[in-house]
Amino acid sequence: MVLRARWNLTNWFTACDRQRILRAKADQPHWAFEDLRGKLTAGVREAREAIVKGSEQIHLAEEGINDARESHELSDKRLSNNVPGSSAREVLLSLQSLSQSEIAYLNAIRAYDKAQLRLMILVGSPSGRTTRDGNCLPVPWKTQ
């Protein structure tokens, strides 16, 4: 009889702890969902910022290409008109500058496209339509 009373008292004293554990287990999916929501929000913000900055970089790279082209044309004209101080090396350096500007342009486009793809993956397909294997169907162009 004493042993049975002791067992019941132990259950009574540990009931609060057991309820806390059960409540924590019940809240765990909620906290996991909130964590996922926060990560998704941060990912979307980061992708959007990368898209905006990528667009700016593309614009700057286009200006760099135009400047490098003008520089190459001037160097080429200087060489063809035998201007003192002009050389073939100057023309080659201007071509190298032009090619580096074009590489920077391509890298900016690549980063922009990656950011757009990352955003599309985070928010889903733009049309909400996918094939059976999960690929996005193209969005039909609207004609006006």
Image (cartoon, rainbow, N blue to C red):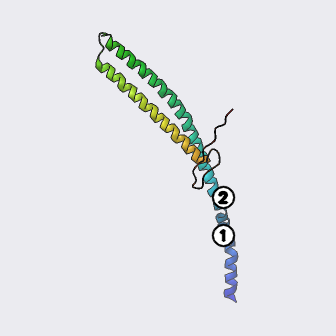
In the image, residue 97 sits, relative to residue 44, either above or below, namely: above
Residue 114: give x, y in percent of width and height: 51, 41
Work out whether residue 22 or residue 141 is closer to the camera in this orientation and state it: 141
Amino acid type, callout 2: His
Please state, as top left, top right, bottom left or bottom right, where the C terminus lies in the image. top right
Label 2 CA crowd tier, 10 Å (few <14, some 14–19, many 20+): few
Work out whether residue 92 or residue 16 is closer to the camera in this orientation and state it: 92
Q: Residue at x 63, y 44 (%)?
A: 126
Image mark for residue 17: 1
Q: Secondary structure at mark 1?
A: helix
Image mark for residue 30: 2
| In the image: residue 22, left or right of residue 99 | right
In the image, residue 121 sits, relative to residue 60, either above or below, namely: below
Please state, as top left, top right, bottom left or bottom right, where the N terminus lies in the image. bottom right
In the image, residue 41 sits, relative to residue 94, either above or below, namely: below
State which tag comes first along the sequence, 1 or 2: 1
Give the Cα separation between the discs numbered 1 and 2. 20 Å
Q: Residue at x 58, y 53 (%)?
A: 134
Question: How many numbered marks does the figure carry?
Answer: 2
Residue 95: give x, y in percent of width and height: 36, 24
| In the image: residue 107, left or right of residue 89 | right
In the image, residue 32 sits, relative to residue 51, either above or below, namely: below
What is the quadrant of residue 87 in the picture? top left
